[in-house]
Amino acid sequence: MKVAVVGSGIVGLSAAHALLDAKCDVTVFDAYDIPSRASASYDRSRMMRLQYGPQSGYAHLARRALKSWVELEQALETRLYRPTGVCVWSATAESWTAATAAALADVGVEYRAATFDAHTGRVLNRSALGRGVYTQEGGVLLAERAVIALTAVAARKGARLRPRTPVTDVDTERGLVQTAEGAVTAADAVVVAIGAWTPKFLRRFVGRVTPIRSIVAYVTPPEDLAADWAAAPCTMIETRESMLYALPPVAEAPLKLAGTTNLRQTDPDRPESVTPQEAKSVLEAFRPYLPEIERYRIIGTAMGHYADPPDKTFIVERQGRSVIISGCGGRMFKFAPLLGTEIAAVLTGRTPSTTLDHWSRPLALPALSMSHLCRGGT
C-alpha cells in the first residue's frame, strides 16, 4: 500500500512510523525541513498530563496516549518520557480542580489533593494558590528528541523523505499529491497533518481553524532553588486570565515556563522571532506564583504555530482516500502516537473507518475568549 504523508510534525511522523510498521510504502512531504522546525512540535519538552478540568473525554484519551508513548519509547529504543508526576492548581474558583478530580475518578486514575512539600513549598507561592490535584502519572515528553528519532527511523525503514517540497494540492478523493514543482504522486491513501497551515492549504477549513502563535521561555532558576525544581512535578496553574505551565528541568531540557497570555493570531508562513519583551512577559505572568521571579534568568525561547478550532476539539476527518488532522492547539502533541497508530490501522483496513470518529467528538468546554485560546496546550 502506497501512502503519502503531508506534514512532518509529530502527528505526520507518528502516522508514518505506524504505516511503515504495517509494511506500507510511505512518502513524507514538508515545505520545510524534516522534521519541521516550523511546526508546533519542535520544542525541547512538552507536558504529559491527565488533568483537564471537567473534560473527562481528554482524561480518557490521555491515559491511552501515555501508554502509546511508552510503547513508542520501546520501539525506537530511546528515552522519550520522563515521569515527574503532574500537579494542577487553581488560583481562582475551586470548581475547576473539583471537576478535575471527578474526571480522574471517572477514568480510574489515582490522584490526591496537592500539598506543598519541601520542594514545591519553596518554589511556589502558597498564598496565591487554592486547591490542587496531583497525579503520579504524567511528566515531561522530550519533544525534539521524539521528532528527530521518528525521522531517523522512518529513513532507516525506507520512507521517502521530501523536505523543502511544498505541496500545492491534494485530490483527497483520488489520492493525488501535487508539489510546487508540478510533480504528482499517486497514492492509495493520503494523510494531511499540517496544523496551522490547514486553512491555507484546504480552503474549506477557513474559519474552522485559527492559526495562533505560542511562545515559551527556558529559564535557569535561582541557584538555591535548582534542586527543588529538579525534584518538582510538572505544574499547571489555572488563572482568570490564562493557563500557566512550568515543566521541571530534566537531563534533556531546562526548566520551561509557558502560558496562554501571549497567544495571538498569526500567519504561519511569516514567522516572527520572539522578542526580549515577549520572553520577559512569560516570566511576568508567573510573578504572583513564583517568589522572586526576577531571580530567574532566561536562557532560551521557542515559538510554535498552533491550529485552534472554535470548539477546542480535534479535527480528524476521512475524505475519500485521505485523512485530515488539525485543531486543538498544542494538545495534539501528547496524543500523536496514539492517533498515528489508529490512522494506520484504519488506512490498512485492520479497523473500520469509524475507529477515528471518537477524536472529533466534543471533548472540551464551549469556546472561550482569545486570552484562553489553546488552554491546556503545553
Image (cartoon, rainbow, N blue to C red):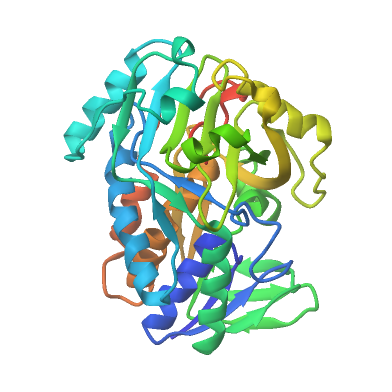
Q: Is residue 291 left or right of residue 67?
A: right
Q: Position of residue 182 (x, y in %)?
A: 78, 79
Up-down: is 36 above or below 307?
below
Q: Quadrant of the N terminus?
A: bottom left
Confirm whether residue 34 shows in the render.
yes
Up-down: is 143 above or below 96?
below
Q: Position of residue 137 (x, y in %)?
A: 29, 45
Up-down: is 7 above or below 23?
above
Confirm whether residue 374 shows in the render.
no
Q: Is residue 331 left or right of residue 199?
A: left
For residue 21, what is the image quadrant?
Answer: bottom left
Up-down: is 83 above or below 148?
above
Task: Name the residue rendered at 66%, 48% in the picture.
Answer: 199
- Front residue of 154/245: it is 245
For residue 309, what is the image quadrant?
Answer: top right
Please give the count of numbered marks on the rendered protein.
0
Q: Position of residue 245 (x, y in %)?
A: 52, 33
Q: Position of residue 176 (x, y in %)?
A: 60, 76
Farthest residue toward the front?
224
Task: Name the residue rendered at 48%, 80% in the picture.
Answer: 188
Task: Name the residue rendered at 45%, 33% in the picture.
Answer: 235
Task: Name the residue rendered at 46%, 30% in the picture.
Answer: 236
